[in-house]
Image: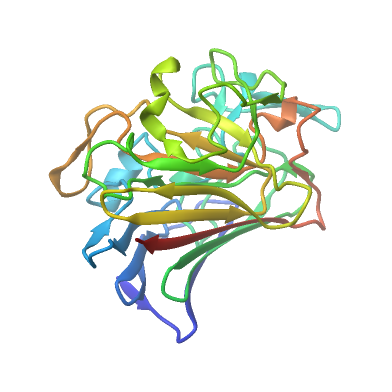
Amino acid sequence: MANLSLSILVFLILSLLIQQNECANIDVYELKRGDFSIKVTNYGATVLSVMLPDRNGKVDDVVLGYDSVKDYSNGTTYFGALVGRVANRIGDARFTLNGVVYHLSANDGNNTLHGGKTGFSTVIWTVKDHKADRFPGDVSVEVTYMLIGTNKLALRMKAKPKNKATPINLASHTYWNLAGHNSGDILSHTIQLLASKITPVNKDLIPTGQIVPVAGTAYDFLKAREIGSKILELADGYDINYVLDGTGKKHFHKAAVVHDSKSGRKMELWTNQPGVQFYTSNMIANVKGKSGSFYQKYAGLALETQGFPDAVNQPNFPSQIVSPGETYEHIMLYRFTAE
């Protein structure tokens, strides 16, 4: 494991050229500032751990995950992974671009989820290690993980098409439990989502194309409240894209604030993306995780800043098409405190 540090910030850059398979080593890297540290692997550009002190100085790992990197290659949860080329779902595993119909691998019923069967989460970064899954053209991708000061974690994802216009929508799929990864469910966490609208979905979780207000529904988190306070009004839990209110007003805007009263830990999330997928690990059941723990439903929450799901098939959603000569850039900033 490599220990990387600088006096002002510590950072790790992982890059991926979508071209061909070559042999590569899987490594684990640690970024550390005092009691605040993260571990990342170049397999799927995956976040393995985030260590944070609580209000009393007790340090815990606050992200869900597995004991070994090998477990990530066999998992189906996307714990901590960098997902793409197009995160979230594409309806019917197909889309049309410039008059050409592209058929993708269906790995979520009839739909494509998080890039398909060979998405960015299943390849080794820093090498030419991936054959395109029938998306148009080749893309070079880079993600930088940075610790800023003593309490901020930033991710910068950049992608450039090499020869054809193509959809790009990258997302970080980290599951958070601010009380500690093995502390039970997150239903007592409070969350504020700075979004007054959502993109509703059908039974297969594909957006209908509508954009509707959250006012008066269980999806309204404009004012902070416990995640579990209205979850019984839903069929299963939260798994929906929120339309962030800051979009179009300023380049970088606050998306969410999460607080755990037991530990005192608080997490603010900022982004330059128009949406954030709020997911309460509804489909996790008896998953063997770190240190012999078993994760159950609602064990963690994911906040995936992103472009809107299925935007390639929804003409009224912001476009995710990036052409050669253009650069896709996605920034996330987490600020952690304890009070």
Residue at screen point 44% across, 16% down:
233
Q: State the residue at coordinates (33%, 50%).
A: 178
Give residue 335's position: percent from left, percent from top.
48, 62
Residue shown at 21% from the left, 44% from the top: 183
- 242 w.r.t. 214: above or below: below
Residue at horizontal 50 percent and vertical 38 percent from the top = 118
Q: Is residue 281 visible in this depiction of the protein?
A: no
Question: Residue 26, how many percent across, how many down?
Answer: 36, 60
Identify which residue, 139 or 114, lies in the foreground: 114
318 to 272, vertically: above or below: above
Q: Is residue 29 left or right of residue 129?
A: left
Residue 249 visible from this viewpoint: yes
Q: Position of residue 313 (x, y in %)?
A: 73, 25
Residue 10 placement (x, y as % from top left): 46, 76
Q: Is residue 15 left or right of residue 300?
A: right
Number of callouts: 0
Q: Residue furthest bottom?
A: 7
Quarter of the image with the C terminus is: bottom left
- Residue 31, by quadrant, is bottom left
Where residue 38 sits, quadrant-wise, is bottom left
Q: Please indicate whether residue 212 sits to the left or right of residue 292 in the image.
A: right
Q: Residue furthest right?
A: 99
Decide which of 102, 187 is in the foreground and name it: 187
Tell me which colouring the rendered structure shows: rainbow
Query: For this view, does 308 lie left or right of residue 175?
Result: right
When the figure is inspected, residue 195 is found, relative to residue 323, above or below; the finding is above
Which quarter of the rendered picture does the N terminus lie within?
bottom left
Q: Which of 70/143 is in front?
A: 143
Q: Nearer the viewer, residue 124 or 55?
A: 55
